[in-house]
């Protein structure tokens, strides 16, 4: 079939296998180039660093999780296991991008002599934890790093039969702000109704730290954590203009819980010389972030400002910086006053935020976005689904089952 891109309400319904392979290969090439020789202190070579060698990534098929896997494997020579929840392809329907990414990653890692296992399973389930633990036992012995990078709309509790859903809503009162979709550059106004009933608690259940703790507890009980094992999960804070829908909304409650869970896990890992962290990352277009109201407009302004200042990064650059200059730099790990790692430092610089705020005030509902980079956001969004690579012929008939 000829695979074209179909987007509905900022969700891509299709993905292109050749393009997803290209997106993975491009990230691998960038990491290898910097790992071997680097001219920049922001992205130092990894040769002399004690990078982790056996890595588990929960949510390793797209976005920050995929980048974590790529940096670990191609920047540090790690064997990796990824767990992700992705749709398989059929003769007439494409897989989700993460399915193609995982296949492309496994092929490339194996060609370089690295072990790579991609499981497509629900990370919240006990049986998945058991399956992964068996695999670690058989193939790795122990793990040195567990990255927790899930972004999920729901969590099913098999025992009680309850389904918890995560929602992106303000708490207390409705929030109205300017917004933009990926399909048109006309700025609109969006009103988001506040969370009702148990929606905030349910969001914490899905996106908070409970499941992260369950993973580490289980792997520890099975004796699969190496001495000095680290674990990291990802969070976001962002500017005040997104607080009502993000940091002070339902997802913010979940992130607070995630951050508190890092402290619990840090205590749990201390006896084996291990440690747990939350890293606060930059706003970037991923499948998860594109559907947050207001955020695409903020990202469009932020991208343009950061590109003008020469400090725009994508997930892979962010994670490379996290590993090489913070987690595995060999120096004391720098944290903020809350114990978090900050790779959103460039995004949150006062000159960057000041300029984004100025541009935010220029926007008017019903008019095209001003001084933003919606094109850049859109092009990254297309590429993470395998579209928009100039040298790929998108008119070709391809079998969606072949990566
Ligand atoms: P993403 O949508 O690209 O990746 C989510 C991953 O979770 C995918 O691999 C998906 O397959 C997996 N997943 C979802 N449900 C699953 C399940 N039940 N079982 C197994 N795997 C499952 O999202 P993104 O943006 O990379 O988010 C990852 C983390 O980074 C999240 O905690 C997010 O809040 C955080 N973050 C994201 C930022 C952004 O701007 N994109 C900024 C800062 C933090």
Image: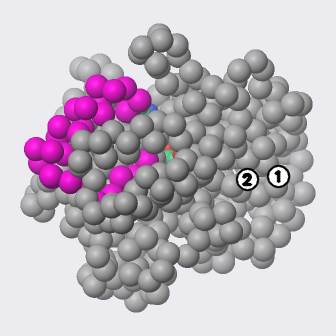
Q: Secondary structure at mark 1?
A: helix
Question: Foreground: 329 or 177?
Answer: 329
Residue farthest toward the front in the current orientation of the protein: 271
Q: Is residue 179 above or below residue 87?
A: below
Residue occupying the point 55% across, 47% down: 261
Q: Which class describes the residues within 10 Å of circle 2: few (<14), some (14-19), or many (20+)? A: many
Quadrant in the picture for the N terminus: top left
Q: Which residue is mark 2?
A: 298
Residue contact at pointers 2 and 1, CB within 8 angstroms: yes
Closer to us: mark 2 or mark 1?
A: 1
Q: Is residue 54 above or below residue 183?
A: below
Residue occupying the point 49% across, 24% down: 155
Question: Foreground: 79 or 332?
Answer: 332
First to last magenta residue range: 123-148
Q: Position of residue 210 (x, y in %)?
A: 51, 37
Quadrant in the picture for the C terminus: top left
Q: Secondary structure at mark 2?
A: helix
Q: Is residue 163 above or below residue 349?
A: above
Residue occupying the point 48% across, 57% down: 266
Residue 124 lies within the magenta run? yes
Residue 235 lies within the magenta run? no
Q: Which residue is mark 1?
A: 241
Q: Is residue 185 visible?
A: no
């Amino acid at each position: 079939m000829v695979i074209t891109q179909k987007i509905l309400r900022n969700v891509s319904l299709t993905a292109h296998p050749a393009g997803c392979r290209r997106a993975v290969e491009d990230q691998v090439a960038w990491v290898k180039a910097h790992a071997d020789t680097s001219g920049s202190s922001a992205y130092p070579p990894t040769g002399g660093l004690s990078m982790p060698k056996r890595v588990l990534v929960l949510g390793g098929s797209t976005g920050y999780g995929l980048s974590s896997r790529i940096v670990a494997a191609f920047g540090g020579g790690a064997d990796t296991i990824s767990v992700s929840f992705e749709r398989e392809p059929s003769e007439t329907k494409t897989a989700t991008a993460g399915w193609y990414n995982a296949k492309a990653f496994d092929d490339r890692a194996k060609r370089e002599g690295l072990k790579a296992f991609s499981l497509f399973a629900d990370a919240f389930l006990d049986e998945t934890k058991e399956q992964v633990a068996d695999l670690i036992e058989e193939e790795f012995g122990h793990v040195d790093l567990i990255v927790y990078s899930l972004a999920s709309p729901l969590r099913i509790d098999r025992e009680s039969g309850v389904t918890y859903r995560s929602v992106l809503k303000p708490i207390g009162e409705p929030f109205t702000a300017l917004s933009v979709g990926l399909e048109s550059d006309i700025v609109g106004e969006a009103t988001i109704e506040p969370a009702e009933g148990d929606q905030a608690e349910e969001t914490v259940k899905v996106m908070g730290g409970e499941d992260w703790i369950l993973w580490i507890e289980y792997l520890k009980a099975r004796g699969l954590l190496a001495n000095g094992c680290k674990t990291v999960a990802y969070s976001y804070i962002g500017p005040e203009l997104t607080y009502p829908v993000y940091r002070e909304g339902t997802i913010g409650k979940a992130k607070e819980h995630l951050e508190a869970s890092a402290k619990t896990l840090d205590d749990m890992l201390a006896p084996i010389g291990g440690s747990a962290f939350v890293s606060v990352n930059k706003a970037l277009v991923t499948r998860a972030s594109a559907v947050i109201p207001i955020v695409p407009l903020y990202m469009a302004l932020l991208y343009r400002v950061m590109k003008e200042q020469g400090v725009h990064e994508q997930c892979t650059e962010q994670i490379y910086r996290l590993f090489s200059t913070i987690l595995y730099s060999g120096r004391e790990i720098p944290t903020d006053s809350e114990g978090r790692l900050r790779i959103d430092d460039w995004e949150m610089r006062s000159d960057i935020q000041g300029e984004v705020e100025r541009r935010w005030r220029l926007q008017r509902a019903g008019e095209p976005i001003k001084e933003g980079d919606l094109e850049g956001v859109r092009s990254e969004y297309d590429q993470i689904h395998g579209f928009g690579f100039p040298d790929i012929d998108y008119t070709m008939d391809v079998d969606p089952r072949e990566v």
